[in-house]
Amino acid sequence: FEQKIAQLLGFEAALFCITGTMTQATALRIACGERGSRLVALHPTSHILRHERSNHVLFDHFQALQIGDPQRPWSVSDLQAIPDQLGAATLELPMREIGGQCQSWEELDAIKHHCHALAIHLHLDGARLFNAVVKLCRPVGDIARHFDSVSVCFSKGLGAPVGSMLCGSKELIARALRIR
């Protein structure tokens, strides 16, 4: 099951977790540790800030840095305006709290290239990733290739009672297995 989802999204490996909350915190903890910065750029309406009761603070996984306007998706210019060294940046596609908005395809490319140029781990909160497929008119693998890691939730739009998958490199998933 893990390998099937990894292949579908175009990643080397995947790890099943019971909740998306677990996959998000795990991916960001690893990314920040690898990059020596605990700062993670998050939209003000991100699931991590609004619905996970800031568990990342409780467990001291990373520090959230809010980015962008609460009424629109954040952009590469919002990211470029941050003077601090980021360990990671997280996008949610589509953005549930602001009506399912998504960055444009061109904006996703610009964000990806900026993050890679500065060695910022780009993570996708893909709880509703399969809804973004419809919005962006692109295959799921094309969308996922913009990111270093992706979290997919099986209970959001897919009807499973529980479960989430973290996808990434073999190294990231090996570390995530130990943390899980």
Image: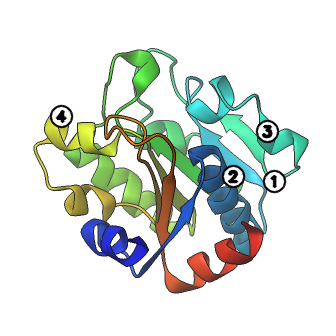
Instruction: Choose the circle earlier in sequence order: 4 or 1.
Output: 1
Question: Spatial distance from mark 1 to mark 3, Cα to Cα?
Answer: 9 Å
Question: Spatial distance from mark 4 to mark 1, Cα to Cα?
Answer: 32 Å
Between 24 and 90, the residue placed more toward the observer is 24
Instruction: Choose the circle earlier in sequence order: 4 or 2.
Output: 2
The colour scheme used to paint the residues is rainbow
Instruction: Choose the circle earlier in sequence order: 3 or 4.
Output: 3
* Element type where label 4 sits in the image: helix
Mark 1 closeness class: few <14, some 14–19, many ≥20 residues within 10 Å: some
**Is residue 83 in view from this perspective?**
no
Question: What amino acid is found at the position of numbered circle 3 in the picture?
Answer: Asn
Does 54 sit left or right of 72 as displayed? right
The residue where tag 2 is placed is 25
Report if the CB atoms under discs 1 and 3 are less than 8 Å apart: yes
Instruction: Choose the circle earlier in sequence order: 1 or 2.
Output: 2
The residue where tag 4 is placed is 135
Question: Spatial distance from mark 3 to mark 2, Cα to Cα?
Answer: 8 Å
**Is residue 57 in view from this perspective?**
yes
Question: What amino acid is found at the position of numbered circle 4 in the picture?
Answer: Lys
Report if the CB atoms under discs 3 and 2 are less than 8 Å apart: yes
Report if the CB atoms under discs 1 and 2 are less than 8 Å apart: yes
The residue where tag 3 is placed is 55
